[in-house]
Amino acid sequence: MKTLSSAVSAAALALGLSLAAVAPPTAANAQIAVGVSVGIAPPPLPYEVQPVIPGPGYYWTPGYWGWDNDYYWVPGEWVLPPAVGLYWTPGWWGWNNGFYAFNAGYWGPTVGFYGGIDYGWGYGGFGFGGGEWRGGNFFYNRAVTNLDGRPIANVFDRRVTPFTRSRVSFVGGRGGLTTRPTAAQMAAARARHIPATAEQVRQARAARTNPALRAQNVARTRKVTAGPVRAATAGPNRAIAGRAAASRMTAARTAAASRVRTARTTVAGRPARAASAVRARNTARASVRGSRRSALAQRGASRRSMVRAHQSARARATFQRRSYARSAIQRRSYAGASRRSYARPAMQRSFARPSMQRSFARPSMGGYGRAARAPSFGGAGRQPAMARPQGRPSGGGGRGRPG
């Protein structure tokens, strides 16, 4: 392993040393800003998980391999661009005259050449597909940006196809990419640049002191969660430095947020007090929410009353139908009973007893209407008995007196 000093690298560039046959042209080496050259190729790129965007205005900068006696991974993070209309060109490693040199990233009006390396999340090897500037606002591509339901108004959908679909992290040399910059990318490399922001520099320093981000540890999982890196706490000096960096980051974010609020609360060209404007805005929002809740409550109460009235009307209608049905059944039963009562006397007359039809006149008794024979007392000269006129019968058929 060999390390060249920054002076040697600058001298080599000044002399115009050519790259290997597979390396990009010399014009692209104008991006070399850090005099780091090593004889070991960088490891493959890990799979980086993009965190949720903090809010509107943030820009995604992908992770890359750094060097400090060994490779370590600098995770990507969301940062605020130094000015409106600037894009970030990621850094990349390239083969240069027997060594691997690091080309630092920069901010510029267009995305330059970064070796065709597929960093992901919009940086597929050529340009940036994660978003674009439209006027003074940055629009995000939802296809490759982790918005996670955040209230971001400026969004669009566009499919991004990776340029290489490879995890190789360097250009040139054995096993490296063979991509070359276009004329526009070479022009972007020669244009005026803005270096990395203080937040990006702090991220690189924190990653260098974190043992978990060393190449041998990253190679075990092949997956890294992007986001701000905490400084290692192996010693008190590092802990103090980490706390100081965190406080500086918080102060920078607070200042940026206050500038945004002040710009939004400008009245007649003069900035109003941000605190009073925020309080007034929160009060107005609270009143709107309260009125909305009361309106929803009134609407719910009216709906419940309408439902109760509808249920009462249905119950009354059901009761009336049932009452009418019962009265109809009763009327039918009364009509049937009346018909049966009208038919009953005729049935009684037709079934009159036979004894009532017979005559009450009895037949004549034994001696009624016949001539009684005169009893014979044995005398020969007796006169025969006279026939008794019909009248009340005597008791037992008596004999007539002699003449």
Image (spheres, rainbow, N blue to C red):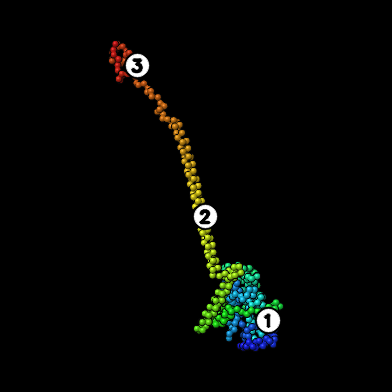
The amino acid at mark 1 is: Ala
The percent coordinates of residue 313 (x first, y second) are 50, 49
Look at the image and tell me whether residue 219 can be seen.
no
Q: CA distance from mark 1 to mark 2?
A: 71 Å
Front position in the image: 212 or 190:
190
Residue holding disc 2: 303
Callout 1 secondary element: helix
Label 3: few (<14), some or many (≥20) within 10 Å?
few
For residue 28, the mark is 1
Q: Residue at 34%, 15% (x, y): give it.
A: 389
Q: CA distance from mark 2 to mark 3?
A: 111 Å
The amino acid at mark 2 is: Arg
Residue 78 placement: quadrant: bottom right
Q: Residue at 63%, 70% (x, y): give it.
A: 137
Of label 2 and label 3, which has the lower sequence position?
Answer: 2
The percent coordinates of residue 369 (x first, y second) are 36, 17
The percent coordinates of residue 157 (x first, y second) are 63, 68
For residue 390, the mark is 3
For residue 49, the mark is none
Between label 3 and label 1, give the one nearer the viewer: 1
Q: Residue at 56%, 75% (x, y): give it.
A: 255
Residue 226 placement: quadrant: bottom right
The amino acid at mark 3 is: Gln
